[in-house]
Structures are given as structure tokens and as C-alpha cells.
Amino acid sequence: MLRMKHRAIIPGEGQVTILDQRQLPHKIILNDYTDYRDIITAIKRLEIRGAPAIGIAGAFALALAARAEVKTDVEHMKRIMTDLAEEIKAARPTAVNLSWGVERVLNIAHDFGGDDKQEFQEHLWDEARSILEEDERLCEAIGRNGAALLKDGDTVLTHCHAGALATGGAGTALAVIYAARDAGKKIRVYADETRPLLQGARLTSWELMQEGIDVTLICDNMAGMCMKQGKINAVIVGTDRIAQNGDVANKIGTYTVAVLAKEHEIPFYVASPYSTFDSGQARTGDEIPIEERDAQEVTHIQGVPIAPEGVKVYSPAFDVTPRALVTAYITDKGITPGGRAD
Ligand code: MRU
């Protein structure tokens, strides 16, 4: 099992601890939450982020909500849980894992046959825990499957952060790096800084350094030059949602990297657990809801203004890479070819 130095979310007894990713890499702050509304806030403000991690957090949020309602019986609790689930799912719209995790706990609630409230609450808590534990195994499998695609000495470009802190285990894209390293291969990583919120600079480069991986940080607009100079052998990214036709939503800028990778004939891989495949809602990438974030995330860097006050801003948090630009999907079940012809 890939063992990581830091975890995004740690469940306790009727409480969860979340590592505040907004403070990284400078401070390691752990926040304990017992109220589901605080977890919604933590998801919205990216204290916890990354598709699988917010799915896990959403599952625990619903399990906590069921613990809070002390005056109600199980049947009443079941009735109000659908609304609570919608409230949690609305925290962030793009990553399908959030609704997937919340729905799993909701289904367990509706299937519960007894009337013992404590048993009901524990049942939901156990389901949230099992989602976390399952995600750890999924990361492991993604790593194992993807590692076979990398050769000793390869350099991988990644965008945003798809490591341990974005999941319940070793990550998706970064699990591939860790597994290849553990298989004895020397793998280097180039990490895009990933404006506006700098997940690549703050989280990917930090996590990889913590894990002893050779990482080089670049600004987003340097990726093309690095590819042209022959520095990159493969691109591996995570994803927030894969539509039924294979289109991939991921952090804004991923599409640009995919276009560049095709131009330079560099394989473009998408690493993902089954929980990120949208089985019910989005048939194509056009149907994936794209979150727009506060203008201040563009006009400011870490609270410091960098643009004229009042400037117009467009701030989509994700973009969609068509299946035609994907070489292959690295999943927990194996490698599935994408739509790129070369
Ligand atoms: O806005 P964020 O930081 O939650 O965006 C995260 C990403 O885009 C990740 O690449 C994606 O969730 C995959 S995480 C394994």
C-alpha cells in the first residue's frame, strides 16, 4: 500500500478533521468539524478540494447532519435527508464525486430498515468511512495500472493537483508517479503552477517534495516551451468529471495542455477512479456544469491585488478536454484507450 505523509480528511468519533489546504505549503492547520454546515463551507472555500476528496467530505457531511438532528426519529430523519443532501451537493457543481459520495450515504439511509436512531447514525457513518477506505484502494489500483505506462527516466507534466491531498489515498495522477517510483523507475515531474489558485505551486510541488520526487515548478504558460524542448515524455492529469462520451472536465488550463500535448505528440493521460465517471447526468462535456469562481481569485494572488480595481473578470474553475485529445484513461480497472488517433 502507498503510504502518504499527509491526509486531506481524517474521521474521528462523530467528527472529522480536515487539513486546511488554503494554508499550504506554509502552515499545516488541522480543523475539527462536527457540524455538516462547516464542511459545506470548507468545500466551498477549498479548504478541502480535489474531486475524490470532496466526495468523501460530502459523505461525512451528510452522516454528520444525521447525527445533529437529536429530536427526530429515523423516519423523519430519512425524509429531511434528501434536502440536506441537495444542500451539500450544491457546494461545488463540477466534480461528480461530490454528488456520488452524498448519494451513497443517502441511499444507505433510505434502505435502513430499523428504528434505532443510534444504529441509523452509525450505519451512515460506516458508509462514509467505507467510501474513504475504498478511495484509498482505488488510488492504489490507479497507481499500479498507470505505472506500467511510464519508463525509467521519464518526465511527466501534470496540471493542478491530483495527489494524496485530493483523495482518500495516494492520489490519481500522482499515484501513478508514486507507484512507478516504487517499481524502481526514476520519474521526474514538471508541475504547472495552475493559476488562479496555484494548486500546482502550493500543493503538487509541496506534496511531491515531501514524498521525495524530483519536481520542477513552471508557470502555466511555460508548458508549451518545455514540450518543444523535449523535456516532457507524458502528461498525466486528474479529473473532476468524465462525461459519458469520454470528455474530461478538469482544472482550467487542462484543455490547453491537452492541445499542446497533441501538437508535440506527447501522450495525454487522464487518471480517474470509477466514481468520477458520470453515469447519469452529462452525456457530453457540453453538459458538465462548470463552476465560476469569485473575480477576486483572478484579480488577487494570495490576497494581494494584481489588477486594476473594477476590471472585468471571467473565472471558470474548470475546462473540458474532448475525448479526441485523450490518449488513454488510467482507471482503477485498467487502461482504457481515449480518442487520440496517434
Ligand atoms: O478546484 P480544485 O482544486 O478542487 O480542482 C481540482 C482538480 O481539478 C483536480 O485535478 C481534480 O479534482 C482531480 S483530483 C484527483
Image (cartoon, grey):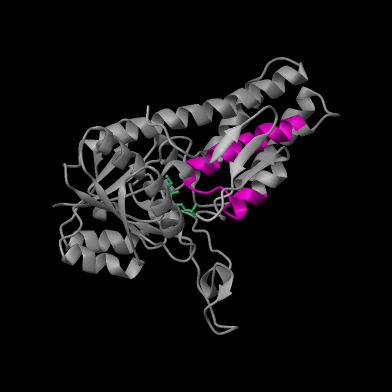
Residue 32, how many percent across, how many down?
A: 68, 40
Q: Give the residue displayed 70% in from the left and 21% down from the top.
A: 120
Tell me which segment is drawn in magenta.
Answer: 41-67
User: Number of numbered discs present?
Assistant: 0
Say which quadrant the N terminus sits in. top left
Residue 332 in sight: no
Q: Is residue 189 left or right of residue 69?
A: left
Q: Main secondary structure of the magenta part?
A: helix
Camera-side residue of 6 and 96 = 6
Q: Is residue 61 left or right of residue 23?
A: right
Camera-side residue of 186 and 45 = 186
Q: Is residue 201 left or right of residue 76?
A: left
Q: Give the residue displayed 20% in from the left and 40% down from the top.
A: 149
Residue 248 in sight: yes
Whether the magenta-drawn stretch holds residue 185 is answered as no
Q: Quadrant of residue 226?
A: bottom left
Q: Quadrant of residue 220?
A: bottom left
Residue 73, how many percent across, how many down?
A: 81, 24
Q: Quadrant of residue 115?
A: top right
* 313 in relation to 130, above or below: below
Furthest toward the right, the residue is: 71
* 68 in relation to 113, above or below: below
Residue 221, how many percent across, how many down?
A: 32, 70
Q: Give the residue displayed 47% in from the left and 66% down from the top.
A: 196
Q: Give the residue displayed 58% in from the left and 51% down from the top.
A: 47
Whether the magenta-drawn stretch holds residue 54 is answered as yes
Camera-side residue of 184 and 336 = 184
Q: Is residue 130 left or right of residue 190?
A: right
Residue 122, how many percent across, how many down?
A: 68, 21
